[in-house]
Image: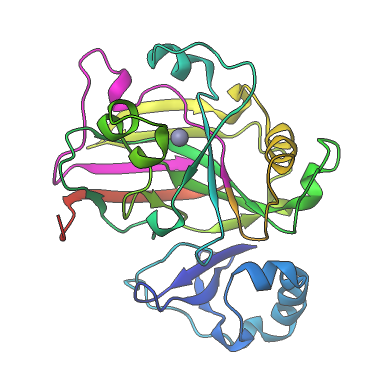
């Protein structure tokens, strides 16, 4: 299944994209795609509900805004330097254990919303990533059992302000957490549709130029390792996101480093997980 959320920001309704690409309004199911939904076997219940109701659901008008495919989760966790060539372009050693940092959940936005360039930003950068969405409470999970705790996968742009991230003291969170720094979607693809998340092409373009082009098979630490690793330090709640790291080709890593300016168009995708697109604008409040 492909879960979507649609409508005005903050007032999104739940829906699906069906196998023919039609978007259907599932608000009559009566639940949002949130922690409580995943926690209470929502995916199974919703699947049963769909078999009865799918033929009578209304199609969503094509121009309708998409929001993040999941409601704001308790945590967005990110993994740093999880592709070898990206570690090299960042001038950092290949890590011996996953590098873990947090991204404010308030940075979440829709897959086609603008990227906001924050106040005083000079180095707003892009990072296409495969995001894992947790399906049930995960604490001290083993690698062997990790897939039991996964609901599905999404495309994520881990937008990053390099100056805030690397030169304002402390650790990376400040450079990762501005509003609209986490466009997620277009949809959450449930894990049954992605038998192996480690053989998917992953790419990103800026203004039509292909800058990131890799495969999730190149992850240094694979998805079961990451779910297990993080769950040994904190409890993952249903709906939480682990973003698995970005391949080479970010603006900071180019021969002539390049950052987003208003009007730049970022397009990104992962095989089987869809394509998203954002235009950079100055944060209207900046
Ligand atoms: Zn990242």
The span picked out in magenta is: 242-270
Query: Can the viewer see residue 283?
Result: yes
Taking the spot 41% from the left edge, 40% from the top edge, the residue there is: 173
Front residue (pair 63, 284): 284
Left-right relation of 274 to 140: left
Q: Is residue 17 above or below residue 195?
A: below
Residue lying furthest front in this view? 169
Q: Is residue 88 above or below residue 207?
A: above
Q: In the image, residue 151 lies at what x, y percent?
A: 69, 56
Q: In the image, residue 64 lies at what x, y percent?
A: 35, 73
Q: Is residue 90 above or below residue 214?
A: above
Q: Is residue 84 above or below residue 117?
A: above
Front residue (pair 212, 259): 259
| Ligand 1 picture quarter | top left
Left-right relation of 131 to 159: right
Asked which quadrant contains residue 17, the reply is: bottom right
Taking the spot 32% from the left edge, 50% from the top edge, the residue there is: 178
By secondary structure, the bulk of the magenta-drawn segment is best described as: loop
Q: In the image, residue 268 lies at what x, y percent?
A: 39, 41
């Amino acid at each position: 299944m492909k879960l979507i959320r649609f409508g005005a920001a903050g007032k999104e309704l739940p829906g699906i994209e069906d196998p023919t690409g039609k978007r259907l309004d599932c608000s009559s199911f009566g639940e949002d795609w949130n922690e409580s939904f995943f926690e209470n076997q929502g995916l199974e219940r919703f699947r049963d509900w769909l078999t009865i109701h799918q033929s009578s659901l209304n199609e969503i008008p094509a121009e309708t805004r998409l929001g993040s495919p999941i409601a704001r989760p308790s945590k967005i966790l990110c993994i740093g330097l999880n592709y070898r060539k990206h570690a090299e372009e960042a001038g950092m050693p290949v890590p011996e254990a996953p590098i873990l940092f947090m991204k404010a959940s308030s940075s979440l936005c829709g897959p086609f919303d603008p990227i906001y360039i924050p106040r005083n930003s000079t180095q707003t950068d892009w990072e296409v990533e495969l995001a894992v969405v947790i399906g049930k409470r995960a604490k001290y999970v083993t690698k062997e059992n990790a897939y039991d705790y996964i609901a599905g996968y999404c495309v994520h742009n881990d937008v990053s302000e390099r100056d805030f991230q690397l030169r304002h003291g402390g650790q990376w969170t400040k450079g990762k957490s501005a509003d609209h720094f986490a466009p997620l979607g277009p949809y959450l693809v449930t894990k049954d549709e992605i038998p192996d998340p480690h053989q998917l092409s992953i790419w990103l373009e800026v203004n039509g130029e292909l800058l990131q082009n890799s495969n999730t098979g190149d992850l240094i630490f694979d998805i079961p390792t990451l779910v297990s690793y993080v769950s040994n330090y904190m409890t993952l709640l249903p709906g939480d996101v682990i973003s698995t790291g970005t391949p080479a080709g970010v603006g900071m890593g180019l021969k002539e480093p390049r950052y987003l300016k208003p009007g730049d168009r970022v397009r990104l995708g992962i095989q089987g997980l869809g394509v998203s697109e954002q235009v950079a604008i100055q944060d209207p409040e900046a």
